[in-house]
């Protein structure tokens, strides 16, 4: 991952019955959904609100181009996971958000999402293209 991040957000997730397999263990695919959810809350904590994205940033958003997770120990129905999220790597147009899932004192999973800041016409997917990350957004996220 990275050394101490300059900006991070912590979000809690309760593992629900619908998140679990017949053995009561959290289904691995939920971690990817939870990483996406935690990215939203990271942006929100930085003052970057999805609800105002196009007006404020003149951007379509930050599409996901890659995601990865390593599972360290199982989480079960009823567990409360504390997820720390932060930007671990910056590029000109792309950035990586790291997520550390803790279940009490133990690490349940670690993952990351690589995203690209994009522009284009929301009605025409053929116009989507990367654009430089605005300095204000980079600063808000600790870059």
Image (spheres, rainbow, N blue to C red):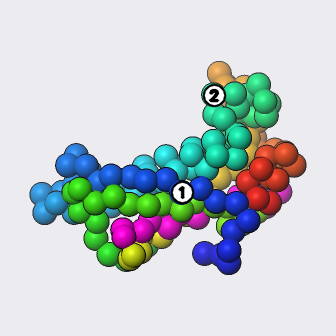
Nearest the camera: 56 or 68? 56
Query: Label 2 crowding class (10 Å Cα cut-off): few <14, some 14-19, many 20+?
Result: few
Left/right of residue 12 with respect to residue 46 in the rendered view: left
* In magenta segment, residue 42: no
Q: Residue at x 68, y 74 (%)?
A: 4
| Residue 21: percent from left, percent from top | 18, 57
Which label sits on residue 51? 2
Query: Mark 1 = which residue?
Result: 10
| Residue 96: percent from left, percent from top | 65, 61
Mark 2 falls on what kind of element?
helix
Left/right of residue 81 with respect to residue 110 in the rendered view: left
Q: Residue at x 36, y 68 (%)?
A: 103
Q: Residue at x 87, y 49 (%)?
A: 135
| Residue 52: percent from left, percent from top | 69, 27
Query: Label 1 crowding class (10 Å Cα cut-off): few <14, some 14-19, many 20+?
Result: some
Looking at the image, can residue 131 be seen? yes
Q: Find the magenta span and give its range.
A: 91-104
Looking at the image, can residue 68 be seen? no
Single out the mark in the foreground, 2 or 1.
Answer: 1
């Amino acid at each position: 991952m990275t050394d101490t991040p300059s900006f991070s957000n912590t979000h809690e997730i309760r593992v629900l019955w619908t998140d679990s397999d017949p053995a009561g263990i959290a289904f691995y695919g939920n971690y990817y959904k939870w990483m996406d959810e935690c990215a939203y809350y990271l942006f929100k904590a930085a003052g970057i609100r999805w609800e105002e994205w196009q007006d404020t940033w003149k951007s379509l958003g930050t599409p996901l181009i890659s995601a990865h997770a390593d599972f360290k120990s199982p989480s079960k129905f009823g567990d409360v996971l504390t997820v720390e999220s932060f930007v671990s790597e910056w590029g000109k147009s792309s950035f990586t958000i790291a997520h550390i899932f803790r279940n009490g004192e133990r690490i349940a999973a670690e993952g990351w999402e690589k995203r690209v800041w994009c522009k284009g016409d929301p009605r025409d997917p053929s116009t989507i293209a990367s654009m430089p990350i605005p300095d204000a957004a980079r600063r808000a996220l600790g870059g």
